[in-house]
């Protein structure tokens, strides 16, 4: 057997086994699932093969080329050089035919053709050839002892120097310094800069070395006390019993004008219905109904029940952008303050809910620069309620005489001071924030990359099966479908298999650099957005062209997105059940066109127009 012959190189290493018979791959997959074949001969073969570490891949007939002794570049099949790794030794195999490509490339090159022709004729004293030399043995052209790279081989040269294992996807300066002493071709600086800038792998994997995108934006000024509120949830606390309920989460509600805050201990099973209960029984008796509520993207706040409840009360529901805490910054600040307070005074984990009320009083009675050095209590009540400290150390009676001053006049004065303090505080924060960020704005239709951690369980096929440490920095590209009025939040066109939110802050995006018409780049294969457990990738479907019934359900003939191999789009049959998850909109449109409600999921059948009888 071949494996026994090459056992010296294969044993102890992982390798790939390519077969042209699909049943061979299926036998290995069956053994991997624990299914033992009944044929004793196959069992004997498998006992000898399973001591090796390898993966089996099937090659279709039209792709099964005749094997030869020359190695092939697995990263780019067009390359004539390849790297073979055996243990810790790298072996670069260069076939003789590789150097035979240079002479005709020189002869047809618009820059080197004249020089090459003159040197072949022996005219070394010509002004055009004075800095060039021709190796008579290899017929290679040199400029100041630097090998000249013709345009026809320039792409392969750049791929070898930049994309290969020994290239390492280095940056522009390092790439130029590595190439310049030994090689020469026209417009080296421009070509190298464009090649590195447009390298999709570099754009996906390298973190940006510039200041983060996006300047700090202000919210509309709140119209009054408790008209605009921010809501957030703090999780991670130990579960304890409080007032007859098990709680392990804190619900934060804060007024954007007065900065007064309420903390409610709740459970992690907190639902939209539970929030409505807290809102109606604990919040509304104190402050009434607000006009604007800003929340994060928790399932409690994005649920249909919560949104319908907000609409019924004429409350505008603003949902923060994913992984951008500044969009709900006031609640995040209060969260940090109460977390710090609990850490300072906690003795036993069971006591943390009992400290919330005292911590709430402390935060509401503490002056802040955002309120012109007044406390939230003063801004809302015009005075600070008494505390145990005032009993032990009484203040001057005049300071506590609330009736001596007209409450209305004092509140108006405090309101004016608070508005000016809000603007001054925001401007100070903005100046500090903007110094470390840069102003950038994308346009609708631009292609952008998204930070991979934001996609959570939906990384693209390039990241499938990778450990967290090996994930790429960015995933994409995706097209911008819309942008907000302030130009910092963008809605992207995401695949139908993506179940998350399609709104992202500009700081989480990277603009995919456009490709100039004359730029030289490495071929970039299209990467699927999703990979299934069997290793197959999710493909994009352009249209559903036909259907046929089967015993259970329907099969639909779908046309894929055109590729180089299939310019008109490959047509493949899929079950209606699988398309309900990956191409719901196309399936719904086709079901309406053919009046077939059975194609779609039961919850969508009311959207399909029933057949019309004539």
Image (cartoon, grey):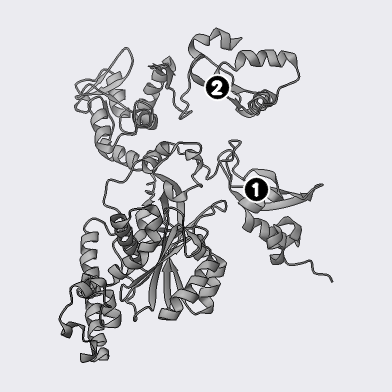
| Residue 187 falls in image quadrant | top left
Q: Which residue is mark 2?
A: 54
Q: Look at the picture and state if 351 lies above or below 38.
A: below
Mark 1 falls on what kind of element? strand
Q: Earlier in the sequence, mark 2 or mark 1?
A: 2
Instruction: Identify the residue at the far front of this view.
Output: 392
- Asked if one can make out residue 424 in the rendered structure from this viewpoint, the answer is no
- Asked if one can make out residue 495 in the rendered structure from this viewpoint, the answer is yes
Q: Where the N terminus falls, by quadrant?
A: top right
Q: Residue at x 77, y 67 (%)?
A: 610
> Residue 228: image x %, image y %?
38, 75
Describe residue 199's horizontal placement relative to residue 177 as left or right: right
| Residue 181 falls in image quadrant | top left
Q: Which residue is mark 1?
A: 559
Instruction: Identify the residue at the far top of this view.
Output: 5
> Residue 389: image x %, image y %?
22, 71
Q: Residues within 10 Å of mark 1 (few under 14, many from 20)?
A: some
Q: Residues within 10 Å of mark 2 (few under 14, many from 20)?
A: some
| Residue 285 falls in image quadrant | bottom left
């Amino acid at each position: 057997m071949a494996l026994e012959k090459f056992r010296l190189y294969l044993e102890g290493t992982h390798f790939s086994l390519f077969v042209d018979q699909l049943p061979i791959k299926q036998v290995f997959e069956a053994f991997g699932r624990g299914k033992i074949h009944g044929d004793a001969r196959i069992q004997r073969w498998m006992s000898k093969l399973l001591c090796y570490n390898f993966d089996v891949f099937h090659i279709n007939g039209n792709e099964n080329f005749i094997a030869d002794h020359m190695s092939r570049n697995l990263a780019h099949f067009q390359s004539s050089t390849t790297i073979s790794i055996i243990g810790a030794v790298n072996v670069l195999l260069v076939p003789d035919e590789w150097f035979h490509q240079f002479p005709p490339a020189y002869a047809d090159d618009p820059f080197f053709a004249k020089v090459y022709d003159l040197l072949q004729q022996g005219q070394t004293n010509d002004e055009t050839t004075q800095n060039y030399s021709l190796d008579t043995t290899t017929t290679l052209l040199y400029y100041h002892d630097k090998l000249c790279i013709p345009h026809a081989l320039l792409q392969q040269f750049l791929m070898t120097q930049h994309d290969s294992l020994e290239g390492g996807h280095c940056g522009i300066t390092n790439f130029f310094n590595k190439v310049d002493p030994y090689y020469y071709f026209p417009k080296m600086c421009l070509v190298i800069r464009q090649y590195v800038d447009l390298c999709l792998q570099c754009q996906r994997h390298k973190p940006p070395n510039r200041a983060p995108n996006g300047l700090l934006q202000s919210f509309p000024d709140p119209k009054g006390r408790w008209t605009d509120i921010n809501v957030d949830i703090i999780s991670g606390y130990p579960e304890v019993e409080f007032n007859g309920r098990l709680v392990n989460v804190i619900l934060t509600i804060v007024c954007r004008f007065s900065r007064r805050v309420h903390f409610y201990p709740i459970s992690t099973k907190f639902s939209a219905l539970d929030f409505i209960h807290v809102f109606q029984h604990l919040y509304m008796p104190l402050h009434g109904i607000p006009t604007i509520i800003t929340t994060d993207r928790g399932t409690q706040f994005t649920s249909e029940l919560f949104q319908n409840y907000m609409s019924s009360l004429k409350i505008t529901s603003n949902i923060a952008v994913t992984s951008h805490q500044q969009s709900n910054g006031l609640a995040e600040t209060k969260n940090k303050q109460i977390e710090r307070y609990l850490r300072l005074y906690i003795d036993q984990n069971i006591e943390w809910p009992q400290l919330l009320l005292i911590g709430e009083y402390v935060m509401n009675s503490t002056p802040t620069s955002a309120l012109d050095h007044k406390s939230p209590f003063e801004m809302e009540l015009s005075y600070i309620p008494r505390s145990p400290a005032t009993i032990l150390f009484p203040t001057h009676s005049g300071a506590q005489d609330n009736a001596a001053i007209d409450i209305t006049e004092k509140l108006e004065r405090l309101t004016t001071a608070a508005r000016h303090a809000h603007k001054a505080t925001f401007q100070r924060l903005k100046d500090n924030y903007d110094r470390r960020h840069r102003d950038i704005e994308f346009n609708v239709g631009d292609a952008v990359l998204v930070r991979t951690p934001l996609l959570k369980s939906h990384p693209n096929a390039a990241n499938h099966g990778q450990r967290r440490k090996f994930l790429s920095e960015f995933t994409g590209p995706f097209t911008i479908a819309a942008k907000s009025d302030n130009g910092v939040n963008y809605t992207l066109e995401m695949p139908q298999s993506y179940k998350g939110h399609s709104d992202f802050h500009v700081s989480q995006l990277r603009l995919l650099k456009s490709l100039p018409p004359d730029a030289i780049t490495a071929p970039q294969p299209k990467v699927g957005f999703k990979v299934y457990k069997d290793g197959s990738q999710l493909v994009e479907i352009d249209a559903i062209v036909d259907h046929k019934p089967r015993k259970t359900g329907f099969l639909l003939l779908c046309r894929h997105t055109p590729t180089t191999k299939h310019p008109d789009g490959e047509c493949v049959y899929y079950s209606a059940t699988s398309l309900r998850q990956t191409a719901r909109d196309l399936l719904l449109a086709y079901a309406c066109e053919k009046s077939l409600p059975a194609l779609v999921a039961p919850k969508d059948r009311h959207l399909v127009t029933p057949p019309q009888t004539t």
